[in-house]
Image: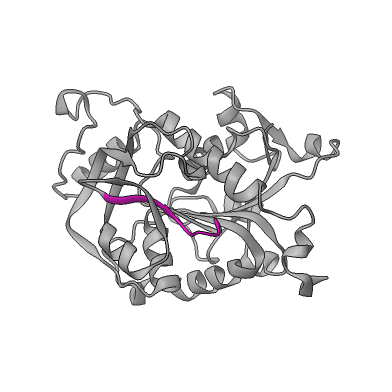
Amino acid sequence: MPIRVLDELPAVNFLRNENVFVMTSSRASTQEIRPLKVLILNLMPKKIETENQFLRLLSNSPLQIDIQLLRIDSRESKNTPAAHLNNFYCDFEDIQDDNFDGLVVTGAPLGLVDFRDVIFWPQIDRILQWAKDHVTSTLFVCWAVQAALNILYGIPKLTRKDKLAGVYAHQTLKPYALLTRGFDETFLAPHSRYADFPTDIIRQHTDLEILAESSEAGAYLFASPDKRLAFVTGHPEYDALTLASEYHRDLANGITPGIPVNYFPENNPDMIPKASWRSHGHLLFANWLNYYVYQITPFDLRKMNPTLD
């Protein structure tokens, strides 16, 4: 089944060119199906690119999904046209009385910024507290993982000395867990972060179960026992050229980044890399949608929070 988005969203044509089944709202309205309602809080600067990446992964499911895009505030964006944000994104006040089957919180380029200096930190806190009563399952990605661990578990910001960038091997620790069902024993996933996620910190200070880890990247995939929280410290949504774009951007800005590990052919930045993590990303999101969202969400979302009746 398809993802359901507004007819004019640029991702519609972008994903259809990849043979991804995208259903516009006008067509979906003719079907008598209760789609899953998934909210995406997009914190990345290049929002259209990020939309395409996450919608691609969310589409790989037999479930019909109704997508709602959420922006953290109304500040002007340097990388996304104001018309796009005004047409396709909602503000928190627009949805604060609604319930959702799933919430995806993306990463953000804030790895070296103290939480207290993040201009929208109060809004992040508010949305995460709101999600406890209004969302069946929330999936946090990269920087959002660090933010959520601090807000929900009181874990301080942990920062690596050098940026972790590249494609790393990970080990599946719980092959029969629902979120890792079908995973290979070892799989690849990209990272691009300063945030540090030591496995011992997570085990000692939370009730979260670590499902996959890397000797180089630390904890990669972990989740709460009730399936309402899932954390991915890498970027399984990245396109093949995303890390290359970040690397060349940093060079152009006068930064001397390390060459992303295990990424460019022959470790040569002039050569075109290929995605070696695509199947893992699709399977991860399909498992989350099926086992963490669809299987436990109420058919009538009003029952999630009876006070809204």
Query: Looking at the image, can residue 190 be seen?
Result: yes
Dominant SS type (magenta)? strand
Depth check: give the residue in front, 109 or 297. Answer: 297
Depth check: give the residue in front, 80 or 151. Answer: 151
Task: Please report the residue visible at 42 percent of the width from the left and 30 percent of the height from the top.
Answer: 278
Residue 84, x across and y down, in percent: 59, 49
Residue 304 colored magenta? no
Task: Please report the residue visible at 58 percent of the width from the left and 32 percent of the height from the top.
Answer: 60
Task: Please report the residue visible at 16 percent of the width from the left and 46 percent of the height from the top.
Answer: 257
Residue 211, placed above or below residue 23:
below
> Would residue 255 be found to the left or right of residue 60 on screen?
left
Where the N terminus falls, by quadrant?
A: top right
Residue 255, x across and y down, in percent: 16, 50
Residue 75, placed above or below residue 60:
below
Q: Bounds of the magenta span? A: 218-227
Task: Please report the residue visible at 22 percent of the width from the left and 28 percent of the height from the top.
Answer: 264
Residue 223 colored magenta? yes
> Would residue 131 be found to the left or right of residue 229 on screen?
right
Query: Looking at the image, can residue 196 be seen?
Result: no
> Would residue 181 be found to the left or right of residue 306 on screen?
left
- Seen as rendered, the residue at the extreme front is 176
